[in-house]
Amino acid sequence: MKEKHDVFERAVEHTVRVRYSETDKMGIVYHANYIVWFEVGRTEFCRAAGFPYSEMERQGIMILVTGVECRYRRSASYDDDVTIRTRMGDAGSRGLSFFYEIVRTDDGALLAEGSTRHVFVDRSGRPVTIPSAIREAFARFVAPEGPGPTTA
């Protein structure tokens, strides 16, 4: 798998507005919600690449999270619009990584960045080789000659 500095350029962007339930008593986003936003970004990336999670699950494939890293840079507050920018790293035979940046939409301030590692499994939870249809859809999507960032 590629390291953080060696990810595909193609990004999917998805904007969310910080909800009151995502904040603490001071109106600052609770740290665990950034990980939830990583999942939102990953879901939107798969959809934009032409292979949404729902289709993977219909085919008996799931993507388990095996690792998470998050570096917090600045705080987001209640009612901020934040943009989740998601990129994919190289895929191995059974897994892949995604890389994220969470930025405040209005000023572009970097709020958090991180990555997740995943393994593909069947319905029984056993690791499987990434199905060729999924691998090919993701490879086409991140190909250098493809269009620029996608906003979901």
Image: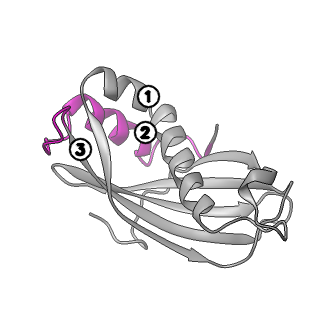
| Percent coordinates x, y for residue 4 in the rendering | 42, 71
> What's the CA distance linking mark 1 and mark 2?
8 Å
In the depicted structure, whether residue 147 falls above or below residue 113: above
In this picture, which residue range is highlighted in magenta? 122-150
Describe residue 8's horizontal placement relative to residue 136 as left or right. Answer: right
Q: Secondary structure at mark 1?
A: loop
Crowding around mark 2 (Cα neighbors within 10 Å: few <14, some 14 to 19, many 20+) is many
- 113 w.r.t. 49: above or below: below
Q: Secondary structure at mark 3?
A: strand
Side of 90 where 87 appears, left or right: right
Where 80 falls versus 138 (above or below)? below
Residue 93, horizontal then vertical, whole percent? 15, 50
Disc with the residue nearer the chain's start (1 vs 2): 1
Mark 1 Cα-neighbour bin, 10 Å: few <14, some 14–19, many ≥20: some
The label on residue 120 is 3
CA distance for labels 3 and 2: 19 Å
Q: Quadrant of the N terminus?
A: bottom left
Q: Which residue is mark 2?
A: 141
The residue mark sitting in front, 3 or 1, is 3
- Which residue is labeled 1 in the image? 50
Could you tell me the amino acid type at mark 2? Phe
Instruction: Identify the mark nearer the N-term, 3 or 2.
Output: 3
Task: Confirm whether the magenta stretch covers residue 32.
Answer: no
> Which residue is more in the foreground, 110 or 66?
66
Q: Residue at x 56, y 45 (%)?
A: 40
